[in-house]
Image (spheres, coloured by chain):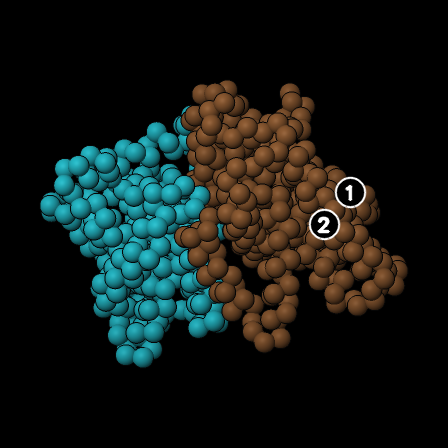
């Protein structure tokens, strides 16, 4: 019994860590820039296929791909920011939403053209290996993905709290106009922030690909999942996203131990609906209390 | 309480006269074509166009006028389809009779999910609607009376195929015409203006006395009813309902693409966007795959969001505005800049 519980907790935490990086980019971009990036999961999907491509063509291990993905997706994010987001960030919110929605549909269908709708898995040496700690058995792939997630979370948190640029980004999240009048280059920082959000999405795609099968057309489920975590946790804070992701991971592993997987989603949905109903203004109260 | 919403305005009546003849001519042409043509493929495609037109107009009410984008219209559609299919399965009722019930089921569901979600401001609502689609899809897989992934079979109508296709053509045509008229009425009513006020500035709208939550709930339930009704008839058309196909996210995405390309927030937008997207897709079907189609349309949507927020309709209005002389002398109208 104790072993079972310990196993559920360990696996739940590992899963939660990976979910945390899947949701982090969405949460930060939403909290700091006020943009709901519905194309977020499309970048997660691209990250998964980057890992697959690097593994098949260059025999690069997903662990390395995780770090390769970061700069690549940072650049992609900065480019998307310049090309699309700059034109809509001051416009009506629905306009930005529609632009990102178009981008999501575009990436998904380009992905389907390039890689078909087949479901893929990444198979490396440790994919089916287990680590045995006393009576506890933990699969290697989630363990490695979880460790990578911790590294990324710590790095992001350190960046946002201990560097000048990170602090400026947080200032911008709290009050964009005040930051602007203090001489902060809001545009450049927004590009960095957006790039970081997309970079973490791409890296999360690599980590998720180690654990779950993936296909271009299923990407939107990750948007739902990431958004659930963001809404449960509140916006823009690395810690709150981490906590709610760990909760979701634990709930999921605990529930899957006793219930069919389908119900996990329903449980989380009910939790979400409850939270939304209890908070009178929905999320608006926390929307601007970013980072 | 809602009677007040639908009072037509003088502004609206002036506009009716303009496009009335053209609209009537097109409608008459479509009725004639449906009755005369024996081209099964064309009738089938146009039937689908009308079906999508209803759903897109429904989306338009809350999405176009109210600025609350629903990325999960298929939820209402699927609930309608399932309501009809279940009523057929257990009570032998024809979906033609139960379509309003299907609409009512969807509307009830729309009200239920509206309570927590419509408190949220625009953008959150959009993503929540996607989550709800997944949740409902799972529910349909697991509920005892929906037969899970097996799905529900309906019996085909005992008539010749051309007649059946024509029947669906006219039913969907009538529904599309009704939906478009309804959206036209909304556009020119206090209800429509309340929605536009919500879209432009929800806090300000509330301050001037718009009951924002009630208006949003009404718009959402109305959209759910229209979409559910069409879903119910769709069940009879497709004859087989199962969770994956019925709750296909593609339907939700298509609806948004069509509305945005045509011009969200105008009654003409869906009338332009739906046929455009579907007929182009149909014409290109032989040469390119549906993914390539979707790539083209998604690029168009991005460009529209960036450069022409009003879609094709917005573009047309812009052109018309530029061609019109600055001073317009018509009865009862004063020039705004003279200051009386």
Q: Secondary structure at mark 2?
A: helix
**Tell me, what hue is chain B?**
brown
Q: Is residue B240 or residue B273 the one in the foreground?
A: B273
Q: On the image, which quarter does residue B83 sit in?
A: top right
Q: Nearer the viewer, residue B198 or A243?
A: B198
Residue A95 in sight here: yes
Q: For this rendering, which residue is in front, A49 or A246?
A: A49
For numbered disc 1, what is the local secondary structure? helix
- Residue A243's place in the image compared with B31, above or below, is above
Looking at the rendered image, the disc whose residue lies closer to the viewer, 1 or 2, is: 2
Residue of label 2: B22
Q: CA distance from mark 1 to mark 2?
A: 34 Å
Mark 1 or mark 2, which has the lower sequence index? 2
> Residue A288 at x, y = what percent?
30, 34
Horizontal side of residue A64 vs B173, given as left or right:
left
State the residue at coordinates (50%, 22%): B340
Q: In the picture, which quadrant includes the N terminus of chain B?
A: top right
Q: Chain of mark 1?
A: B
């Amino acid at each position: 019994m104790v072993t079972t519980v310990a196993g559920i907790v360990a696996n739940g935490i590992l899963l939660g860590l990976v979910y945390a990086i899947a949701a982090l980019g969405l949460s930060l971009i939403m909290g700091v820039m006020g943009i709901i990036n519905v194309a977020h999961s499309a970048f997660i999907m691209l990250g998964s296929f980057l890992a697959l491509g690097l593994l098949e063509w260059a025999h690069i291990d997903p662990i390395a791909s995780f770090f390769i993905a970061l700069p690549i997706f940072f650049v992609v994010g900065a480019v998307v920011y310049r090309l699309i987001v700059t034109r809509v960030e001051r416009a009506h919110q629905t306009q930005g939403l529609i632009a990102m929605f178009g981008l999501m549909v575009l990436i998904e269908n380009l992905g389907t053209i390039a890689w078909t709708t087949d479901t893929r898995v990444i198979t490396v040496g440790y994919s089916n290996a287990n680590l045995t700690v006393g009576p506890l058995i933990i699969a290697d792939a989630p363990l490695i993905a979880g460790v990578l997630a911790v590294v990324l979370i710590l790095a992001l948190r350190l960046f946002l709290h201990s560097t000048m640029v990170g602090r400026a980004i947080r200032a911008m999240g709290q009050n964009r106009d005040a930051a602007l009048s203090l001489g902060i280059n809001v545009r450049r920082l927004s590009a960095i922030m957006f790039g970081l959000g997309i970079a973490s999405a791409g890296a999360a795609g690599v980590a998720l690909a180690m654990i779950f099968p993936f296909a271009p057309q299923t990407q939107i489920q990750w948007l739902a999942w990431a958004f659930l975590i963001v809404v449960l946790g509140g916006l823009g804070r690395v810690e709150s996203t981490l906590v709610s992701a760990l909760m979701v991971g634990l709930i999921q592993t605990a529930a899957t131990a006793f219930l069919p997987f389908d119900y996990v989603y329903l449980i989380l949905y009910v939790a979400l609906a409850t939270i939304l109903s209890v908070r009178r203004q929905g999320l608006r109260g926390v929307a601007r209390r970013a980072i | 309480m809602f009677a007040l919403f639908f009072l037509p305005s003088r502004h609206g009546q002036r506009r009716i006269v303009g496009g009335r003849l053209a609209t009537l001519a097109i409608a008459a042409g479509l009725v004639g074509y449906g009755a005369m043509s024996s081209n099964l493929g064309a009738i089938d495609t146009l039937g689908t166009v009308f079906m999508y037109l209803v759903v897109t107009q429904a989306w338009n009410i809350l999405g176009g006028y109210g600025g609350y984008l629903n990325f999960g219209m298929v939820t209402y559609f699927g609930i309608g389809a399932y309501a009809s299919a279940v009523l057929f399965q257990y009570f032998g009722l024809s979906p033609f009779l139960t379509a309003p019930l299907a609409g009512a089921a969807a509307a009830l569901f729309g009200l239920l999910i509206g309570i927590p979600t419509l408190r949220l401001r625009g953008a959150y609502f959009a993503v929540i609607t996607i989550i709800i689609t997944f949740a409902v899809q799972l529910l349909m897989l697991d509920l005892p009376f929906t037969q899970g992934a097996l799905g529900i079979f309906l019996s085909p109508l005992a008539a010749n195929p051309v007649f059946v296709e024509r029947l669906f053509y006219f039913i969907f045509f009538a529904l599309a015409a009704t939906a478009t008229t309804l959206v036209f009425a909304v556009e020119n009513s206090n209800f429509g203006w309340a929605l536009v006020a919500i879209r432009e500035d929800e806090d300000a709208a509330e301050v001037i006395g718009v009951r924002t939550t009630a208006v949003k709930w009404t718009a959402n339930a109305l959209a759910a009813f229209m979409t559910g009704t069409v879903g119910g008839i769709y069940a009879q058309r497709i004859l087989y309902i199962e969770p994956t196909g019925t709750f296909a996210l593609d339907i939700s995405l298509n609806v948004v693409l069509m509305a945005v390309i045509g011009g969200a927030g105008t009654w003409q937008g869906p009338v332009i966007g739906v046929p455009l997207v579907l007929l182009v897709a149909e014409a290109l079907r032989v040469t390119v795959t549906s993914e390539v189609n979707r790539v083209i349309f998604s690029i168009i949507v991005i460009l529209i969001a960036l450069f022409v927020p009003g879609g094709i309709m917005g573009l047309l209005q812009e052109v018309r505005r530029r061609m019109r002389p600055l001073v317009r002398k018509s009865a009862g109208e004063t020039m705004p800049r003279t200051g009386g």
